[in-house]
Amino acid sequence: MKKLNLSKNAKHDLVTYGIVVVAYLVMEILMKAGLVSSLLKGLLVPLCIYAIMAVSLNLTVGILGELSLGHAGFMCVGAFASAFFSMCMKESAMPGGLRFLLALIIGALAAGIFGILIGIPVLRLRGDYLAIVTLAFGEIIKNLVNVLYIGRDVDGFHFSMKDSLSLNLGEGGKVIVNGAQGITGTPNDSNFTIGIILLLITLVIILNFIHSRTGRAVMAIRDNRIAAESVGINITKYKLMAFAISAALAGIAGVLYAHNLATLTALPKNFGYNMSIMILVYVVLGGIGSTRGSMIAAVILTLLPELLRGLNDYRMLIYSIVLIAMMLFNWSPKAREFREKYSWKRIMKNGKKEEV
Amino acid sequence: MKKAVSMMLALALVVGTLAGCGSSAPAESSSEAATESTAEAGATFKIGGIGPITGGAAVYGTAVKNAQEIAVEEINAAGGINGYQIELKFEDDEHDAEKAVNAYNTLKDWGMQVLMGTVTSAPCVAVAEKTHEDNMFQITPSGTSVPCVQYDNAFRVCFSDPNQGSASAIYMGTNKLASKVAVIYDSSDVYSSGIYENFAAEAKNQGIEIVVAESFTADNKTDFTIQLQKAKDSGAELLFLPIYYNEAALILKQADTMGFKPIIFGCDGLDGILAVEDFDKALAEDVMLLTPFAADAEDEATKSFVGKFNEKYNDTPNQFAADAYDAMYIIKAAMEEANCTPDMSVDEIGTAMIEAMKTITVDGLTGAGMTWTADGEVNKAPKAVIIKDGVYKAM
């Protein structure tokens, strides 16, 4: 049999896609057989959301080499932009599928535009400025959404930053974005299949980006800015491109999030600083720069607290211990030494030698 | 080496997924065949609770959880509902809509038949969507925002936000407390902004002028001098605080330092202000609040509940606890009215209890003669209390 002539990268990528497809097929079969608990069924879409978030943040942190602490802010932008659109279109005759597709595009565009706006001034600087600015951005967006009131009546849209009364809505007017109460009643368009398709699209975009000429330029900037500049790479342009893609993909995750639950509020819990850090944790534990690792870490760390529910009060304690243990296992020098000594590759190599 | 790590992670993923399936397999079969399996087990009602017991809102969830346990112990000791004992399970939602749905699904796997929850508003709206799909009977002790009970399977024990806001305005109007009112509210909080908006709408009809409406957010709630200065300059006679007690305690302290002494009026969120550590109770003198429950009320039921709560958890119950305690007795009353038995399916129990809710009348800690309308709202008299000499006095 003729061996497929694939590069090492292509093989590696195919395994990544394969994991997603196999996971999808296994879950679908199990669901058809009725073996999946309601808990796991309910978790499937969030798993896709967080996997997309982790993979997209990995582009900024791992490939571009910049620290972003406001990734949840981009998710928030995508979520609210798309939910607002869906609420406006809910009563129109537009079919659900088309509406959701448009919502996805709007969410990704909105988040991408914010990414560019933030990137233009900040990515020109050296040092940790992106971390500081994205941190502020995430908090600002969260607070901005909390004081934003948008309503609609026969005259068109009304905006206010004070309260829903000052919208002065006419007869039959409806408040769509109601400040801290957020958006209520978004159509439930997300499902597992859509989530997996979006995750695959995200992976295709990011993996191809990394292996492209542009991706190599971005990694060159990460590894040595001066050297990259000296060979004529436009630093700001490439940085901005990577950052905007990362933000737009976070926006897609936001769209999925907004259309998964009936209520969308910007709480510190879901779009705040903690969430940004949580996603950074996925990336760090999955191995900075490893797309597949980020995805798998996101899935495990989202599942873990739910599967630990049986432990009641101790579950958050155990969860944090697992985080620490994973961190040590992945990054401490001793653990690395140990892993290298007992890695599968080495064991297999030794086995082969013995055969010879 | 990298490969080894990813393989290990992949392995962990598979194990995790399998573990999820494994543990759920028996539960899943029971949801299909809930009727037989529970009937064989001989019968307990499975009632679930959802609320935050970790995170920022843990105070409320813990109070609800504890009160629910007390109520279930009492009901079980007195022979249960229709002769069947109750089994209780409470799941954490961390005050997050997504986690609340996970908690709901966990309880469903466990075989929950009736849901008491959730404690806070935003998660409640998300869960109500799911209970509506399953036609599961749901009663929230303290989810105040309007869409919490938008479906016919959901009811609530507390007043809704609009109800509290307009009740406050009507109370001020009819008792002629003040004509110029200043409001300080938390614009990042659903409860607080909900009350404020409806207060403002009703204030117009009552001839009350809102001279200042200042807001703060959850990220910025320690210094209120700017808001208070504006209120003071505007010449407001009354300061309306539709917020929770922690911030209110700070506001009272800072207003006192500034020499600003208006009439203070609050809603049920102020309940608990006397228990704040290092708070000078004299500052809360003459504060009025609309609350359904005062822990030092003199009636038998309240005394016995507060006593038990104190004994078991070494704490004084707040109105969330009282709402939850009532919620369990409301479930009991509705189940008895509907003649529910544990072998009925979730859907059957739901349909029967929804009908029963329209006919029952319950005397609870948070109000006498509570009745419900089809839209899920409770009818009971709002109670106002005033703080005199460091204790709540009914007005």
Image (cartoon, coloured by chain):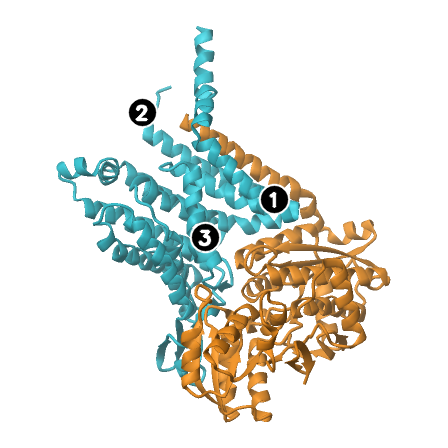
Chain colours: A cyan, B orange
Residue B118 shows in the view: no
- The residues tagged by marks 1 and 2 sit, at their Cα atoms, a distance apart of 44 Å
**Relative to B349, A262 lies left or right:** left
Q: State the residue position of label 2.
A: A5
Going from the N terminus, do you reach mark 1 or mark 2 first? Answer: 2
Q: Position of residue A186 (x, y in %)?
A: 47, 65
Mark 3, chain letter? Answer: A
Q: Secondary structure at mark 3?
A: helix
What numbered label is drawn on residue A21? none
Whether the residues at callouts 1 and 2 have beta carbons within 8 Å, the answer is no
Q: Amino acid at mark 1?
A: Leu
Quarter of the view holding residue A3? top left
Residue B270 shows in the view: yes
Q: Are marks 1 and 2 on the same chain?
A: yes
**Relative to A84, B107 lies left or right:** right
Residue at horizontal 70 percent and vertical 53 percent from the top: B111
Q: State the residue position of label 1.
A: A308
